[in-house]
Structures are given as C-alpha cells and as structure tokens.
Amino acid sequence: MLSQQIITLIDKELKKYPADQRQSAVMAALRFVQDEKGWIAPDDMSDIAEYLGMPQMAVFEVATFYHMYNLKPMGQYTLTVCTNLSCQLCGSGDTLEHLHKRLGIGLGEVTANGKYGIREGECMGACVDAPMFSINNKQLCGRLTNEKIDQILAELDKQ
Amino acid sequence: MSAQIILATAADGLAKLDNYVKAGGYQALRKVLTEKMSADAIIAEVKASGLRGRGGAGFPTGLKWSFMPKNYDGVKYLVCNSDEGEPGTCKDRDILRYNPHVLIEGMAIAAYTMSVKAGYNYIHGEIFEAYEVMEAACEEARKAGYLGKNILGFDFEFDLHNHMGYGAYVCGEETALLESIEGKKGQPRFKPPFPASFGLYGKPTTINNTETFASIPYIICEGGQKFAELGVPNSGGIKLFSISGHVNNPGNFELPMGTPFKKLLELAGGVRNGHKLKAVIPGGSSMPVLPAEIMMDVNLDYDSLQKAGSYLGSGAVIVMDETTCMVKALERLSYFYFEESCGQCTPCREGTGWLYRIIHRIEHGEGKPEDLDLLLSLCDNIAGRTVCALGDAAAWPVQGMLKHFRKEFEYHIEHKRCLV
Ligand SMILES: Cc1cc2nc3c(=O)[nH]c(=O)nc-3n(C[C@H](O)[C@H](O)[C@H](O)COP(=O)(O)O)c2cc1C
Ligand code: SF4
C-alpha cells in the first residue's frame, strides 16, 4: 500500500503532465517510495503500477534502468560516492578507503546496524567540488577530506 | 574579463525573483511582448548572435528554432536539458541554483517564438538542491505572472515544470530524455523523425541545453550582434567553462569564446602544488584528450579545438598533471560508458564492454601487445554505427589516448606497471 503521504506527493507531481500521461510521474513515484522506506520492493512497484495505470513490467523497467533507485535496503543513510574521472583525480579512492576504515564496509555494503550503506555513483555534475558523496540522493557533500568525512559522520551518528 | 551575463554565485541572491528583477531581469521578455516582436525577428536575432547549442554538439540555435512547424494548431513542447552528466561538466548546475530566472526567462522567450505553451526542464537526479531551487523559482515566477496564462498581461501563455532524472547519463541524449519524461527507461530514439516533428508525447518539440536558453535574454536585450562580438568568428558569445581535476582552484568561469586555455588555467590557480601539466580533456569526458604542449597554445572555441584534434563539447575542462596514469584514467572513463550504455545497439552494448575489459586488463598488468590495435579496431566498429552518439563518446577518449599516449600503454603492457 502506498502511504497517504506518497499519494499526495504523486498527485502533486501528476499536475505537471497532461491528464492522459500519468506514466510520466513514475520516476517521481519511485523516488517518493525510496525517500520514505529507503528502498523499493517489488510490491511497491505493483502499487505504483496500479495507481498510475501502467503495466507492472513498465515500472520494473524504470526502477532497474535508473541507477539511483535502491532495489535493496541500503542503510538509513546511503552514501553514494562518485568515482568518475574528476573525482578520481582528486582522491575519491582515498574517500572510499577512509569510509571503509570508519564504517568497516565497502561498495554495495551496509553496516551491521543498518545505519550506513555505500554505493558507487557516476558523475554527479558537480565536478569542481570533487571528491564528493551524496547522502540519500538529497545532499551533496564535496571537497571531502578525511576530517570533513569524520565531521559529517559524527553529525549523522547523532541523528 | 567581460561582463558576467549568466554565471552568478549564491552571494548574488538572484535565485530570488525580486533581486533578479532589480538586476534588470525579465526586461528581455517584456521587450519581446511589448514590441510584439515577430518570431522571424527573434530567430534572426538569435542567428546573428552566433549562439550554438551549449549541450555539446554546438548546433546553431536560431536554425534549430526555425525547424519547429509554424501555423500548427496542435500542442507543441519546449524542453530544457539540465541533465548535466558528462564527466567534468557542472556549469548548468550553477545556472539552476544561482540564476534560475535567467533560464525561465530564456525559455519563455523561446516559447513565445515557437508558439509553445508547455515546457519541461529535465534536471540531473544527483543535484536535488538545484531541483528544489528551480521548483521554488518556477512557483515564484508563476505567482508574479512571468509564467502561466496572460504573462505580464499579454495574450501569451507558457508554463514550465521541472522533471527530475534519477541516474542515467544517456538521458542527456535528447530523445532518451523525452522517453524519460514519458515515464519510460531512457533509450534513445532512432532519428529521423527529429523532435521538431515527433518529440515529447509525439508532438513537435524543441530541446536546448540550460546554458543555451540562459544566453537568450542577453541576446534579446543587447542584440545578437553584440553577443557575437563577445566571441570570435563561428563561436559567438561568451561561454561557461567548468575546470576540474588537478588545479588549485577548480570552478566555473564565464569567458569569451576564443579565450586561451592558458588564461583559464591561470584563473583556476594553475596546476595543483606546482606540478607540471600533462594533459587536458577540453570538452567533457567524451572528447579526445590533448597533451599539454598542444593545450598551452590552444584557444577555447569550436574551430581552434577542432584544429587541435579535439572538440569544445560542453566546455568542461579536466586537467591532469604529471602524476596521472593515463591507463587508469582511461579505464575509469571506459567503465563509465560501459555502465551507461542503454544496451539497444549491439556495437555499443558489446563494444563498450570489450573496451572496458581490455583497458582493465592492461591496467592490471594482464595486457597483451596486440590489445592496442584491438582497441582501435573496436572503436572503428562502434563509432558511427549506433542509434545515438554515446557510441562515439565511448570511442573518442580511447582513440585520443592512444594517439597521444600510446607509449604509456605499451609500457604498461610490457612492464605490468605505470610509467608515472
Ligand atoms: C550520451 C549523450 C549525453 C548527452 N548529455 C547531454 C547533457 O547532459 N546536457 C545537454 O544539454 N546535452 C546533452 N547531450 C546533447 C543532447 O542530445 C542535445 O544535443 C542537446 O541537449 C541540444 O541542446 P543544445 O542545442 O542547446 O546544445 C547529450 C548527448 C548524448 C549523445
Ligand atoms: S549508442 Fe549505446 S546508448 Fe546510444 S542507443 Fe545505442 S546502445 Fe543505447
């Protein structure tokens, strides 16, 4: 079942598109589910399909095509680290290493307490702030150093 | 340096409508409406400006606008491509978050010119903060009568909505982007038909890059000629350059077309820690790399870069110093194209995988002497044989690296380690 909050958000999104193009809101709908639950399960996809009046398979195709959807639990805070060229040149390898040291996990893994997950990202379009990661696809943290990473983790630990 | 016409910073506060208007914003839209400028007159002005698409391909904007059907009764769409995901490129993000109204104004003028009532701005999923700024700016513009029905009291209607991507580089390709707005996976369409005849929801559609639209208000206010004269022949105007990688002060700079690369490097504080410059990718990751000797003498405009063996592309400049292993750099880029191929054309789907695996094995000391020729023959079998240009984008970096840094690859294969 989609929560009332998600339905309200989807309805708002639907107003952007012609009335007979409900499918245009599928990307947003998947994003709202992920924002609420942290990841998207097959059942959520069926619910979205039903609400938007589109085939379940078509929702599945979208969810699997776009990289930022979590198709399995990725922790309360998913840190997506860009490793593309500008970030690589500026030390994204060190970022990953430091996160590994601090959290004990590598790419694609989640800490045992379910608090943090790390994903590899592609270019975020913010290359002048390399190296960087995003938190839950919402906040970009750039020009990372080990000290800055420690500060960010300390803040998140408190929450 | 010339006047800044698009680039702003947070301190300028232009994301707030009031401040934008106080700084002279929406004058171009007002001019077009009050003077009842004809579509032909606007297009002539844009043509005179020499403005070429800032998304990477450099197609003349005035010409593109003239392709939209006229005297057409049905629905037409205007789409802005803010899906900036070409590694190295991050200029549109600064327009969206620091100067969103210049984009809205540019799109409104384009919509007026092509008689379009509805537009979408497709924003890269990774920059949520910019999406939020754009959502707020559109809402503010709507409330103040710059978007919606009867804009500024005239018989002109245009509304703009933001659509967020969610991590697919290929959606920057214009037809994949349209598929994505339609709620599908982003697989490029075969062209023709071109979007001007069959675009969003099958309707005539014009797609331009964020910076392209953002250049329009200046052109209307000051005249196409004046914009053209800021640049050099065949590369009109000013342009945003993102400079990243091994520089002391990475950032976005707004510079006249034809500015020497040397000058941009200086503005970016020079190569980090006093190191020596080794190579530069001058126009986003898809463009062929150029060695320092060539770069230090090159000007940043379409013709100069093409003569030097690369392209201006999106204006994203990635700087690599003497400590960079070219094999490792290329390995990462090849992985990117392999990851991002949408998979519908065999040469791209299979070819990008081959390119990556071969470069990966060279980087990991398992390369064979014949691998380099194999890479080049793979490139020949990908470039020009696919539905969209992602295939070419995967081949060009490989060809560029092997043209200028082949020795480094040979060394890697022979000694199973880096030259640097
Ligand atoms: C794989 C691929 C990725 C692209 N990414 C972008 C992009 O992020 N932003 C953009 O404006 N154009 C991008 N383009 C170019 C667009 O297809 C299109 O040419 C452009 O948006 C047209 O606008 P312009 O004429 O104003 O440049 C890409 C093209 C390809 C083939
Ligand atoms: S070239 Fe690659 S990305 Fe483009 S349509 Fe073909 S398979 Fe898809």
Image (spheres, grey):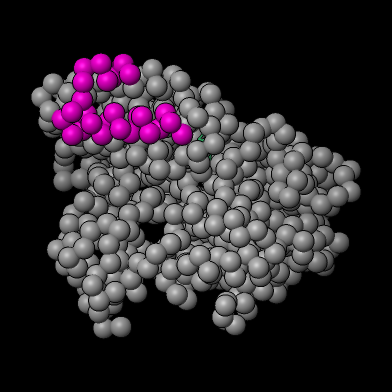
Determine which quarter of the picture holds residue B193: top right
Res B312 visible: no
In this rendering, would B71 be left or right of B32? right
Determine which quarter of the picture holds residue B176: top right
**Which residue: 50% across, 41% down?**
B342
A148 and B22: which is toward the camera: A148
A5 and B273: which is toward the camera: A5
Quarter of the picture holding the N terminus of chain A: bottom right
A62 and B112: which is toward the camera: A62
Q: How far across and how far down the image is residue B88, in percent?
A: 38, 44
**Which residue: 25% across, 23% down?**
B405
**Which residue: 12% across, 28% down?**
B416
In this rendering, would B341 be left or right of B325? right
Image vertical order of residue B283 relative to residue A45, above or below: above
Image vertical order of residue B364 relative to residue B77, above or below: above
Quadrant position of ligand 1: top right
**B352 part of magenta stretch:** yes
Q: How far across and how far down the image is residue B338, in percent?
A: 40, 38
Residue span colored magenta: B349-374
B37 and B65: which is toward the camera: B65
**B191 part of magenta stretch:** no
